[in-house]
Every structure is written in structure tokens, then in C-alpha cells.
Amino acid sequence: MENTATATEKSLKQDRYEQPDFYAIDDLLTEEHKLIRSSIREFVKREISPFIETWAQRAHFPYEIVKKFGDIGAFGPTIPQQYGGGGLDYIAYGILMQEIERGDSGMRSTASVQGSLVMYPIYKFGSEEQRKKYLPKLASGEWLGCFGLTEPDFGSNPSGMVTNFKDMGDHYLLNGAKMWISNSPKADVAVVWAKNEAGRIHGLIVERGMPGFTTPETHGKWSLRASCTGELVFNDVKVPKANLLPGKNGLGAPMMCLDSARYGIAWGTIGAAMDCYDSARRYAIERIQFGKPIGSFQLIQKKLAEMLTEITKAQLLNWRLGVLMNEGKATTAQISLAKRNSVHTALEIAREARQIHGGMGITGEYPIMRHMMNLESVVTYEGTHDIHLLILGNHITGIPAFA
């Protein structure tokens, strides 16, 4: 399917987005941050906004966007330049995710999985040979990757995974299955977490084309419809020993990857919230009822004021978390707080924005319902809303409630 739209479709979907910045948070950003934001915002307005409603309505993943993301530097922005990454800081990474998710959560999922869940573990835990082989092609968008942790019976409890590999002398033999895997149907490589014969979790790089490795696509989604989701199935897959990630093992390794991805989600979902707010603000000014704009009514102003308040709070929280990430001081609990807060904030804003838009809010002429449906996935993946609450509870009390 082509990623083209008629002149009429483009005019209906003109992107007039203006970012809210009530507390002059721009003053906290560097000129490089602002330049990166300007570049990715124009990219989203040009390459995503005119087409995203059609893609979502048709449940179409535009594979051509992968190379375009690579060209603009959306993959692995914090990975050193010598491996094809951007060599940028975590605030720049957050800005990239915020602008992409402002366009669509599924598009941001494609980018954040590639950077935080595929490139990050290869860079952090991989050998120098693995870094040189995989990272440049992933950074450029020549290859697409995915991350295999969640299993049919083990989501919030990944330590219970049954996917396993055995040492066969000159290779490993991998068996098992993963599900709810973003990018899997189109992925060239998968970073897969499995247990060895001693029950220890390790990461392995599995490549498309290895006999016994298949990636069935998940159909019938009401959410993230412009993103491709599927399974990873391993039936006696022979994995070369050179594909084992040597730098770290145990559950802590994939959890470090998830921390990086959750940080991106904290920024990204506020991008979706800002898009909903911007659309609702403009609609409230333009929509006439009872002879005047609905924005003149107290209840509409209340909704908009509360949206702006929550967005501003989240922007400041995310910026401070970005500073902590840059300093290497951010904790898992701090990242959990931000991910949980941002997704909840974005969902509430999407729901309020839908009411301001009235009946038009359920149509593809406006982005609201698409954002709302997408966020229903984001509130669950990479740690559910309640699991992040329990991570915070464990930090506060020192008592784990989920084990």
C-alpha cells in the first residue's frame, strides 16, 4: 500500500500543531535540543500526519517509514556515533520520542523498540563484533529489530519465562515463544531473552532466516493499528554461539533495557497529550454553539485549564528525569513514576478532549480517538499501570508486593 494521499485528504489532515509551553520550559533546553525538535517536528508533519489516519483505519504498517526514521536519526539517538547512533543526550532522546508520539504512538513504538530495546542491549551488553555487525544497520533503518521478553503465560512476571536454549557444542538450540512483540512481523533481528540449562536468563540475537524461527502477525487490534505486532516462535532454532550477548545476564539485563524504553514513553505519551490538547483548544475556539464559541463556556475552560496544568507538570517532571538520566542517577522507581504519570495524564487528556470535540471526536478527521485507543496499549505495555505503582510501593516501604 502506498503512503500517498489525495490533495483532499491532505487538506483535511493539515497539521496545525502548536506546542504548549506555559512555564517556558524551552529556556531549559539547549539550542541543539531545539534544532532536533524542529527537525523531527517537520518530519512528523511531512511524513506521518498527512497519512496516519488512513494507516490506522486500514491497520497498515508503512514499512517505508523505517528507512526514513533511520535517515533522520530517530534510531538509537543516544548510541555513540561510531556505531551509527546520534551520540545525543537523554533529553534529546525524550524530545524525539515526544514529537514522534505526537504523530502516533505506534510510530513511536517502532522507533523506541529499535533504539531502547534492540540497539541499547547490543551496545550495552554485546561484544565489539556484535556492535559493529548490527548497530550501523539498525541505526540506518536498513534492518528493523524487535525485543522478545513477554510470553503467552508470563507478562508482568518475566522471570517465569519458559523459552530456553541448550548448549549443543558448536551452537545453541533455542525453543519457546514470545508474544505482543512490536516490529516482529517485519524484523530482521530479534534480541531474545531465554533461560539456559541452569535457569539463568541470557540475551541472544536471532536473525530472520534461521530455520525454525517464525514471526506470526497479530491481527484484529483496536490499538496501535499503524504499528506491526506479532509473535516470535522458536522451534529448534540453531543460534551461533557468537550471537549470545556476553556483557550481562540475569533478569536485570532486560530490565535495564525496559528502563530506557519506559523513559522514552514518559516523554512520548505527553506528546500525544499535547496533540489532544492543541486540537481541543483550537476546536473550542472555532466551534460555535448557542451563538458563541464553546470555548466561552466555563466547563470547557475548566477542561482546557486542567489539561494544560497536567501537561506542564509532566513536562517539568520529564525534563528533571532527563537531567538525572544524563547524570547516570535516575533509578528504576523514578522512571516508573514518570511512565505511570505520563500515560495516565495522556489518557485523561485524550478522554476530556474527546468530549470537547463532541461527535467529531470519534472520527478520523481529528486525532483524538486514535490517540485514546493507542494509549490503552501504552498503559499496559512495558509495565502495566499497577505494576509501576507496586514498583513505587516497593521503593517506599522496602516490601515487594508482587513476588
Image: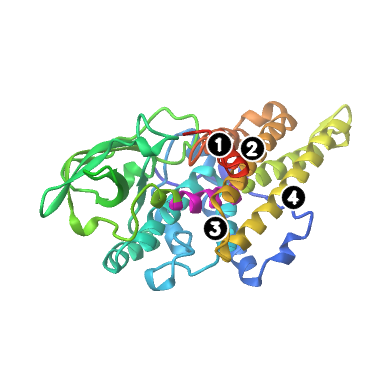
Does residue 113 belong to the magenta stretch? no
Q: Range of the magenta residues? A: 256-269
Residue under pointer 1:
379
Using the rendered image of the protein, determine whether residue 188 is visible from the camera's viewpoint.
no
Tell me which numbered mark, 1 or 4, is placed earlier along the sequence. 4
x then y, percent, for residue 155:
41, 34
Tell me which numbered mark, 3 or 1, is placed earlier along the sequence. 3
Does residue 267 belong to the magenta stretch? yes
Task: Please say if the residues under marks 4 and 2 sit with CB atoms less than 8 Å apart.
Answer: no
Q: Quick one: SS at disc 3? A: helix
Residue visible at 60% across and 39% down in the picture: 393
Colour mapping used in the image: rainbow
Q: Amino acid at mark 3?
A: Phe
Q: How many marks?
A: 4
Q: Amino acid at mark 1?
A: Val
Which of label 2 and label 3 is nearer to you?
2
